Amino acid sequence: EHGGIAKHGAKKWALIADKLGGKTQKQVYARWRDYLQPGLTTRAWAPYEEEHLIKIQDVIGNQWAVLARLMPGRSPNAIKNKFHATKRKIERKGGDDD
């Protein structure tokens, strides 16, 4: 997929999907957005990142793409997954601060 993006740019998803065969433009774009785009990190989440995510999600809601713009290096999908995992962890501990 990297080669298709390097050749065609990160906008022509239908053309890239056609070149790959067997994938839709939506699948190709989602793979790039969530795993392949430059600048994404796979390092473990720091506690301050988890806290920041909980706070900004409380204000913005489940707009994962918007939240991703506020957390450089993390994809919308990674943010969504981490939010739900963190929320479950808080609920298991009984850590509701209301």
Image (cartoon, rainbow, N blue to C red):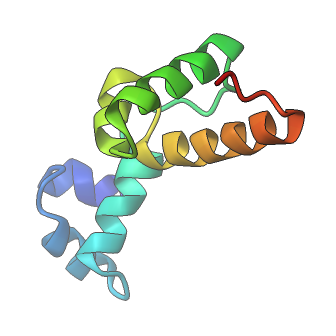
Q: Residue at x 35, y 50 (%)?
A: 33
| In the displayed structure image, the side of residue 35 where residue 96 appears, left or right | right
Q: Looking at the picture, does residue 73 appear above or below residue 5?
A: above
| In the displayed structure image, the side of residue 96 where residue 23 appears, left or right | left
| In the displayed structure image, the side of residue 41 where residue 85 appears, left or right | right
Q: Residue at x 69, y 36 (%)?
A: 86
Q: Residue at x 44, y 50 (%)?
A: 34
Q: Looking at the picture, does residue 28 appear above or below residue 82?
A: below
Q: Looking at this view, is 3 or 44 the one in front?
A: 44
Q: Looking at the picture, does residue 18 appear above or below residue 26?
A: below
Q: Looking at this view, is 64 or 57 the one in front?
A: 57
Q: Looking at the picture, does residue 78 appear above or below residue 42?
A: below
Q: Residue furthest right?
A: 93
Q: Residue furthest top?
A: 48
Q: Position of residue 38 (x, y in %)?
A: 37, 34
Q: Residue furthest front?
A: 98
Identify the image quadrant of residue 47.
top right
Q: Quadrant of the N terminus?
A: bottom left
Q: Position of residue 81 (x, y in %)?
A: 59, 48
Q: Quadrant of the C terminus?
A: top right
Q: Looking at this view, is 48 or 17 the one in front?
A: 48
User: What is the total number of numbered labels drawn onto the structure image?
Assistant: 0
Identify the image quadrant of residue 12.
bottom left
Q: Position of residue 14 (x, y in %)?
A: 16, 74
